[in-house]
Image: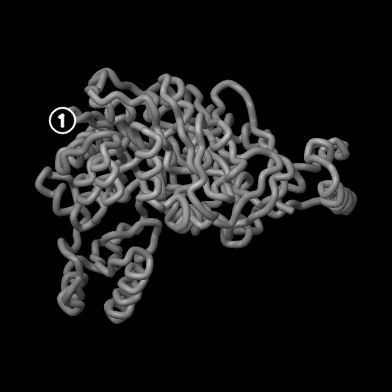
Amino acid sequence: MREIKSILVANRGEIALRIMKSAREMGIKVIAIYSEADRKSPHVRYADEAYCVGPPPSSQSYLLGEKIIELCKKNAIDAIHPGYGFLSENSDFAKKVEEAGITFIGPSAQSMEIMGSKLGAKNAVKKFQVPLVPGTESAIEDVQEAKKIAESIGFPVLVKASAGGGGKGMRIIHRLEEFEEQVQLAMNEAQSAFGDKSVFIEKYVSSPKHIEIQVLGDQYGNVVYLFERECSIQRRHQKVIEEAPSIAINEETRQKMGQAAVNVCKACNYYNAGTVEFIVDEKGNFYFLEMNTRLQVEHPVTEMITGIDLVKEQIKIAMGLPLSFKQEDLSIRGHAIEIRVYAEDPTNNFLPDIGKLIVYHRPLGPGIRVDDGYEEGMQVPIYYDPMLCKLIVHAPTRNEAIAKMIQAIEQFEIVGVKNTLDFCKFVLKHPHFIQGNFDTHFVQKHFQPEFLQLHLTDLEKNLVAYFTQELFENSTTQTCKETTTTIPNKSLWKMMRLK
């Protein structure tokens, strides 16, 4: 067993703070790193120690793996938790951490390498009878040969970057005559984004649901699945709303997908926390998509329905402890929903927005959780992902969880940056979402920017204009708290949310 008395969290914002809280509850000393832009961030103040690692750009701070390792060696820090993003799926970093005698709280570098390549992952899991989408088994080298395979599969087909994610290096090809051009575009984008132009093709599932399975494995070959998360509400191929369990999955399918996820872990000798992602077609058939070898943004919904702290389990596994529970010990308790609150403008193609959080009031109440790394008065920087926070609710049933989330959104006050709160409320109130009749194309099918435009009377418009002007004039000389007292009606804040 490896003793862990101190953990450096190689990340920032809400995930850094969330990891630190669990570690501190275990009696472990927590160390933060920060860029110059994050000097006053909550995760820095919460930590027992904090070290600046460079200027605001992540390439000059949070991505400096060797500098972070040296910092740990110099200060006798036992372990590194990478969170998600940045260095979390960098197998070379994980390997160097272990070589330096520091515990990496995550999977082995070898597992990360296998699952970091979509083609490598497919080749590894097919030996374990994991369902795969029909397609090429290796990177495209001969475009003409690939064209023949595409014809045999049947159009439309999907071109995907082997090393990719987030929709980069991905193209849907509907016709044979556009095949060569689209493959070349996908290769160019993959090379630019990942330094690897390898792409492959597979059958395009036209109305897919995106379902993922949370897994935990120890270093002794024990693996369990902690049920599924529904992640089909997406924009630009990135998730916005997640829930657990999925309304579309019955118990028989749940067990089959869970076992398939366990088999994926066995295919790469996986340990620690991970997520196996599947797509599900209109007929309920599911196919392996990829594995994320880290903690996921949406992990709180799994924690809510299982009662298990995934970060604490990660730390215990990294210490060399066996899993303290078996598959039969796990059960689903109620329903949980998470929304990602981004500093984005949903009325303008979800473009990021930056600025000062003039008002930032979190919702409170039983079954409501907010994971964030911001406070009122802070600046939202341009350098990082624009997610402000994760808002999570838990209730006995799905309908109750939806109602609780809508109520929490209405209580959440954010002024200073445009955000996705009202967009998420729109989704939650949509009949197709309530009925579970949705797929990854929900936004394209059902959302129009004008749906979020406020319809105000002339009097309301004048009031909003007046108090908006007064707010920004006063904010230069008064604190945010002092400025908010000049607003006589809280509903005006809600009218100003999209202004």
Q: Quadrant of residue 437?
A: top left
Between 443 and 169, which is closer to the camera in this rendering? 169
Between 350 and 440, which is closer to the camera in this rendering? 350
Q: Quadrant of residue 117?
A: bottom left
The answer to whether residue 308 is left or right of residue 61 is left
Location of the N terminus by quadrant is top left
Amino acid type, residue under disc 1 in the picture: Gly
Q: Tell me the residue at 38%/63% (across/down).
A: 168
Name the residue carrying label 1.
221
The answer to whether residue 175 is left or right of residue 374 is left
| Crowdedness near tag 1: few (<14), some (14–19) or many (≥20) residues, C-alpha within 10 Å | few
Q: Find residue 154 and report its horizontal and vertical position in percent.
A: 23, 67
- Most distant residue in the left direction: 127
Render colour scheme: one colour
The answer to whether residue 40 is left or right of residue 66 is right
Between 461 and 377, which is closer to the camera in this rendering? 377
- Regarding mark 1 in the picture, which secondary structure is present there? loop
Q: Tell me the residue at 43%/38% (across/down).
A: 9
Between 179 and 18, which is closer to the camera in this rendering? 18
The answer to whether residue 448 is left or right of residue 313 is right
Q: Is residue 285 visible in this depiction of the protein?
A: no
